[in-house]
Structure formats: structure tokens, C-alpha cells
Image: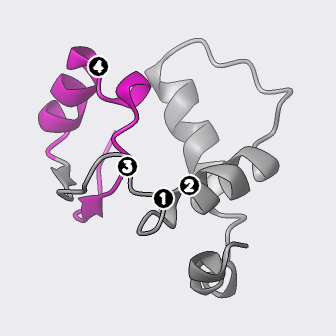
Amino acid sequence: MKTEQGTFQHDNNPKRLAKKTKEWLSKKKFKVLEWPPQSPDLNSIENLWELLNQYQDKSTHIRNEEDLWKDCQSTWSKITGDMCSKLEQGY
């Protein structure tokens, strides 16, 4: 699995800050954007998580890392640039 260069932003939700998550991001060489925790006034990423949740195929059965990667790529491909530009407005 090849990882593109870029910076990852998440919302500092404790569920996504587990040691295993941090290790996985580090292992895959993701740069993680420093972000203040629990800052809804700054956090348009919450709107993106909701948008991704809406577009995710709920019938997909994820059994391993490869399945998860394919599911993420498929879901991301449904999100347009126009949708992302509207996130600041509270999609």
C-alpha cells in the first residue's frame, strides 16, 4: 500500500488518539497537523467526518488493512473540491 505525501488533520478526539493510531500514522509516515483539542469554532474537520460518514458504503465488510484502505479511497473519491470548500460554512 502506497501512501501519498501530505498532512493529516484530525480533531483530537480521544478515540482517534489511541497509541495504536499514533503508531500507525507514524509508521505510514503521515505528517499530523498540530490542532487544539475540542475547538469546534476552528474545527471544520467535524463537518468532513460527517460528510465522509454519509458517503461511506455501509454494506462494505472491512476485514483487514487493505479492505480499510480501499474503502477509504472509494469514500474519498466521492467528496468533491466544491464540497470541501463549503465545510467552513458548516456543510
What span is in magenta?
1-29
Element at label 1: loop
Would you say 4 lies left or right of 86 here?
A: left
Mark 2 or mark 3: name the one nearer the start of the chain.
Answer: 3
Q: For the residue marked with disc 4, what is the amino acid?
A: Ala
Mark 1 or mark 2: name the one nearer the start of the chain.
Answer: 1
Mark 1 or mark 3: name the one nearer the start of the chain.
Answer: 3
Disc 4 to disc 1, C-alpha distance: 21 Å
Dot 3 crowding, Cα within 10 Å, few <14, some 14–19, many 20+: some
Q: What residue would you read off at disc 4?
A: 18
Q: For the residue marked with disc 1, what is the amino acid?
A: Pro
Residue 41 is situated, as x and y percent measured from the top left of the image, at 46, 67
Q: What residue would you read off at disc 3?
A: 10
Are dots 1 and 2 in contact, CB under 8 Å? yes
Mark 4 or mark 2: name the one nearer the start of the chain.
Answer: 4
Q: Which mark is residue 40?
A: 1
Does residue 65 sit above or below 90 in this rendering? above
Q: Say if the magenta span includes residue 91.
A: no
Residue at the spot 57% in from the left edge and 51% down from the top edge: 73
Element at label 4: loop
Dot 1 crowding, Cα within 10 Å, few <14, some 14–19, many 20+: few
Quadrant containing the N terminus is top left
Disc 1 to disc 2, C-alpha distance: 8 Å
Disc 4 to disc 3, C-alpha distance: 12 Å
Disc 1 to disc 3, C-alpha distance: 12 Å
Mark 4 or mark 1: name the one nearer the start of the chain.
Answer: 4
